[in-house]
Image: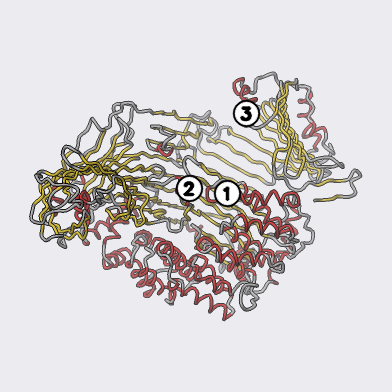
Amino acid sequence: MKGLILCCLVALASNDISCWKLLPELGLNPNKTYEYKYVGTVNFGLGIPNLAQSGTRMSCKIKIRGVSEQTFVLQVSDFSSEEFNGVEGKNEFEVSAKLTERIASQLVKPFMFDYVAGHVDNIRSSAEISDTIVNIVRGMLGSFQLTVKITQRIYELEEAGIHGKCQSSYATEINAETNDMTITQVVDVNNCREKAAIYKGLATAVLDPVSRQRGESVVSTVRSVYTVKPTVEGGLITMAHGLEQQNFNKGISAHIMSAYPQCLTAIKIICYLIKHLAEANRYQIDTTTSEDTIKLYQLLRVIPYEGLDVLWKQFAGNEENRRWFLDMIVEVNDARILKFLETRFQTGDLSANEALQTLLLAFDHLQAVPDLVEMAKMFLTMPFSKSNVYLWQTVVLSYGSLVYKHCAYYTPCPVAAVQPLLDMARESLSNGNHTDMVIALKALGNAGHPGSIKTIMRFLPGVAATPVDLPPRVLSAAVQSMRLIAARDPQIVQEITMSLFLQKKLATELRMLAFMILFDTKPSMALVSIVTVHLQEEKDLHVISFAYSYLKSFSRSSTPNNHFLSTACNVAVKILAPRFGRLSYHYSKAMRMDWFNDDFLIGTATEVFMLKSATNIFPTEIMMKGKFYFIGRILQLLELGIHAEGLVELLGNGIPGFKGDLSFSDFQAVLNVLKNWEVLPNDKPIMTAYSRVSGQEWFYADLKKETIDALIKSVSLSAGKGSSLWVVIESLQRGVSWHWTKPYLIVEVRYFQATILGLPLEISKYYESISGITVNAKATTNPPLNGQLGQLLTSDISLETDGFIGFTKDFWVYYGINTELFQCGSEFKAKTPLSIPWKFTVKINIAEKKFELDFPSFQKFLFSFPTNSSNVYAVTRNIEEPELAKMTPIIPNPIDSNAEVVHSGPTAVKPDSDQVQSKTFDNMCAESNIYGVGLCVESEFRREYYHDEYPLYYFLGYTHMAFKVVPVQSIKPVDKIHFEVNASPSGHPVSTRQLLETLRRLSMVFGYPWNVIICAPDWNSTPEAVFNVNFFAMNGNQKPEGYDAVFYYTPKPSKSTQLIVSQVGENINWKMCINTTVKPHVEAMANIRWGAECQTYGMSITSENARFPGAKPKINVLFYFFFSIFFISPRFESYIPGIALLLDFYQKHEKNVKQEISASLVATSADSIDVTIKFPEYTVYRQAIPFPLPPATSTSFNGTSETQQ
């Protein structure tokens, strides 16, 4: 996306002639009047023919007269404002009459300024003149701003201008005939020490300088050419021509312009919008209203506090409107929202849940300026904040997050901001209150203030000045509280974490946490080398395993921020691999997977950490993180963690009967130990879970003994009408109707930059969502409950329910000029709706182990999966003529004469369609004529491709993708779909021989023995029918159509299973037969056949362990078919050799079995496998493919001993 900004200044009269040697400086004679013609133009578009663009042009006459030697007055006359929206060469600029009148009414008033030696300063105007008008005048006077040096033809200097303090390059040339000097000035706006720009939003996103430098969003250069004539008073500018060019390469950006009415009118509009949004989204998510939320946010931001109080009084009594108001008011991101919440906390007219949600989002979106941070401290001392444990946690954690954002904008960050949290931490340490320690440390972790490091050190063993003896959960919180300080003061964090890591007597889990934080500091190659040396001497296998797997994962990282770290880790891995490269997966592990696209500068990363110790068989801590890389910013999407200190202590270092093969007996052994949970102390959590978003912890909860006790009592079979579950059942029997809606502004990012016209360039992004769910449900039990929950085990339970779940997500991206008077630029709009309605009946009988589900036919019930529609528009709007706003698709619709026209008022623009590349795809559907339903994908793209130069241009154009469930013609009319699971199927037991003999006999007809069936260990064993499943399309008394599945299990002498799936219907004989056999620690086999009576296609899989000395674990896969048919298309088969070559496979021509394709995978080592694939005409193979495998087990020949690595 490009922006071209031009201004031209021409003197209307000038007669003085002088000599440059005598008059080097620019100047104006205070006794004279100077007249100029001024034209300023701005255009936004791709700069490509036949594509739409938008623009604004301002023209006027300027008169300058002197007041004193250095003070002058500027007056403007004949002002005109024009706008452009369309295709260059086919559309023209049009005068905006009303906007011209409004701007001209302010420009006619005099503006005073100082002018000394070619530099403009101290522009003054009357109080009623708006900032936008002053900025327009600033742009006009910018044409007089330059530095002349007649002793140098080419020179560079830093000077203050409209873009800030920037580097300017000059070149001068004197015309020998006219004696005029031509001065060319080039300003690199990206190289400014004090840039006139403001960035708001995403303070919690981590900067990635490497990719940001490669993908700078706005590249701006300004070139100005001046004609200067020598006069008696000094050099006089007779003409100036400025061109500012901006390439918006990588990012796309949105702002919705609204007129701000008077307070009373605004309140009425807000009332209407909230009521309308609440009603429109009650039973579904109305995608047509989602954009109104942005308008509502803007209106709420301009009304005074008294207006917010009036609105609260109107909505407080209506549950639906009240919830919408509280969800929307959080975007009032200044002192008014804090004052509103202060009043609510004092009066106590919010529930704890309402207060928690409102304060969490309000603090998250609050402007992190000093006054508001100071004001927010009051919530840490208000009694209402401590009335609920989760509300108190939210208040403290949210304040910590606010401090973090404050420090992102103010460097160095004052300690006063974090002082309340430091006081809480010190007080909790002196009182010995572990609960308060954890919350204070977590809040300090959110704040990430370098000034808190001394307080954190008091909690760390071996680092604190005085010895500390604290439980693992407090120590864990203390170490993790340095995670964000790692980026702000890496040196001190490296010293502390390195000290912790090297303490061999410290708890294993704590040393691994310290290792993680150490690498968050992005250590140097030298420090990584020191860590590597110590790891070679380490004795704790969990520490070694965790550190090695961490280093190995990061050695493969492709994200720019890890470029140097991955190199260092790669060297470390090569040193450590010979000793530690084959450690078992039973030890602690760190895993990271990431990818990054260098063209689009986007990527993702996922990290999983599992911390264990030698004394425990289960992990004490598990953490999962997700990150998104986007043009110089790293968004830490979601982090989840579980700290199971109490649970691990209960399980201890051994569980009676636990074998480690994750069988049912293992599960039963763990369950038997968990029954002893009552022996744990009351003050120690059994488990703690937490969640972080954008690196900020917003929620954590402790699972304690009393919680489990209450849960067990509520679901006890002897529980009666006093239990909470009974209350739920009674309400379901009466009928329940519940509805919830949540609007949420996920992202708001705005960037402002000055331009040579004085008008602000804005790049802004808004990502807004409305989510909702409606549930109607009614339950019945037969016979009716008599007072105990235990009766549910023998009753028929029926539940009827209907409702919907869905959301709409809107993404706006705007790039252009944005003022309170007018707007012109490029706008990207994307909408992603999802709506899933439901209506079904569930029937359950626990005693009979039956589950039934009935839902209407798809002829009556349709829904869509996520749909995405987007387009890019050239937009022009002005506040005086909102009905004339225009939005023209930048890439027009070439399909027919009814090209896309976007109405933003009575006026719309239909673009021309010449020379536009487009591609339209027809619908693709997968249909089932049994159930009368199809899953369809709709897609349409209209694109102009300039991929090599600007990769993100790929997204500039119309896009539509939709996934829909649609009705199709069924074999028979369908009234309902019936799904049934019966876990106690009726029928007489049959032997394995009886069950499989028929299939075996049929197989022999085609000359192919089924190895798995023949090797069945006991033909007379009796398989147990475990369950059967029916999935039918039903219509009255007609025979059902669909599928039936029966699962059998034979426990002895070897574990074997059989699954037979049959298609049900007239003249249908399709079946699928699956048979598996497992010999523990030896081999596992599976045989799959399908087609007519299971006799068309087949596949067998055999997995063998290393049973004999020197043998290797392997997996064999065999695909076969019973007829001479071409099951692989010749075209596809022709690609196989090429694909094999790209994947580094070798190929050899040999004749194999004609009706087979087989694959063999052999584990040649703990981290590599050999793969061989045989086709009828050739074989492809590759050896030593890197692949992580669990430790190999080798069994001696006589089977009497077993060793495990």
The disc placed on residue 1083 is none
Foreground pick, 454 / 587:
454
Tell me which label, 2 or 3, sits earlier in the chain. Answer: 2
Q: Residue furthest top?
A: 1124
Depth check, mark 1 against mark 3: the one in front is: 3
Of 396 and 656, the residue lying toward us: 396
Is residue 1156 visible to the viewer in this orientation of the structure? yes
Does dot 3 land on a helix, a strand or a loop? helix
Q: Which residue is mark 2?
A: 211
1160 shown above or below 68: above
Q: Which mark is residue 843?
A: 1
Of the residues shown, which amino acid type is indicated by label 1? Answer: Lys
Q: Badge 3 is on which residue? A: 1139
Q: Residue 1038, located in which quarter of the rendered image?
A: top right
Is residue 737 placed above or below 1038 in the rendered structure?
Answer: below
Marks 1 and 2, the one that precedes in the sequence: 2
Q: Residues within 10 Å of mark 3 (few under 14, many from 20)?
A: few
Disc 2 to disc 3, C-alpha distance: 33 Å
